[in-house]
Structure formats: structure tokens, C-alpha cells
Amino acid sequence: MRKIEHIGIAVKNLEVSNLVFEKLFGAAPYKSEEVASEGVNTSFFRNGPNKIELLEATNPESPIAKFIEKKGEGIHHVAFDVEDIIAEIARLKSEGFVILNEIPKKGADNKLVAFLHPKSTNGVLIELCQEIS
């Protein structure tokens, strides 16, 4: 893992939350997109070298909708940039981490992604991200 790629924040209303973060950072999101496979709409903000991803559920069965129902709005995951997501999945699996999707899938912001189950990471959902070339 080379660096924190972004922090994901679950929100009930992306439009309202975008306004909050625009005021906070003094800039509009640099990117917004739907990730249909995850049932979310996303917005990305930059703050210096850091990125924040806001995630709004597009349907009541999406992981974000279920997260908000249980825990309310807030930090959903921490994503780490990796050079080789396949190798990193294998390494982490061999270390005993529970991998939620052993085959990476296309995520937001031109990334291949995979997740580690929070029960194996002290309650924190971890996302691995590799830039798609």
C-alpha cells in the first residue's frame, strides 16, 4: 500500500453534502459519477494531496443505504492506492484478512477496487485501489 487514496463518506443527499464540502474546501467536486454496480452516486473533492469521496445510495439495497441505516452518515471506508491489486489481495489473504471480493471490479474514478471485511481490520472497511491504465 503506497498511500491513502481517499476517504469515503456515506451521505444521505449528495446535492446537499456537495454544498457542505464545497464550503469546507472552497472548491466544487472535481468529478461526479454513478457506479451502478455498487448502487451509488459519488462526488470527489481534492484538498491538497488528499481526496474525499462522497457516496449516496441510488437504491435501498445498496451497501451505502444499509450503512446509513445502521450507522448514519459518516466515514464509510479508507481507500489505499496499490501498485498491483491482484498481488496485494493475495498478500493480504495470506496474512489472514477477509477479502470481500477476490476479483477486483471497476470502481469510481478510473480504479480497479477490492474490499477487506471490517471484521478483519478492527472495524474499518478498507478499499484497495489500482489506477486503470
Image: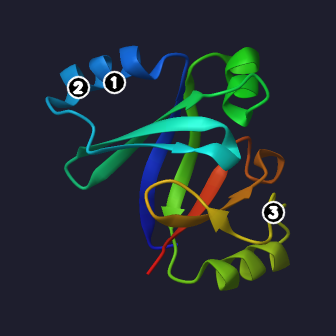
Distance of mark 1 from mark 3, alpha carbons? 31 Å
| Tag 1: amino acid | Asn
Residue 38 lies left or right of residue 22; in this view the side is right
Q: How crowded is mark 2: few (under 14 residues within 10 Å), some or many (20 or more)?
A: few
In front of the other: 30 or 88: 30
Residue 39 percent location from the top left of the image: 67, 37
Residue 30 lies left or right of residue 4; in this view the side is left
Do tag 1 and tag 2 residues touch (Cβ < 8 Å)? yes
Circle 3: element type = loop
User: Which tag is nearer the camera, tag 2 or tag 3?
Assistant: 2
Residue 83 lies left or right of residue 96; in this view the side is left
Residue 99: image tag: 3
Query: Circle 1 is placed at which residue position?
Result: 18
Is 66 placed above or below 80 here? Answer: above
- Colour logic: rainbow
Q: How crowded is mark 3: few (under 14 residues within 10 Å), some or many (20 or more)?
A: some
| Residue at 73% across, 41% down | 123
Residue 45 percent location from the top left of the image: 30, 41
| Residue at 57% across, 19% down | 73
Task: Name the quadrant of the C terminus.
Answer: bottom left
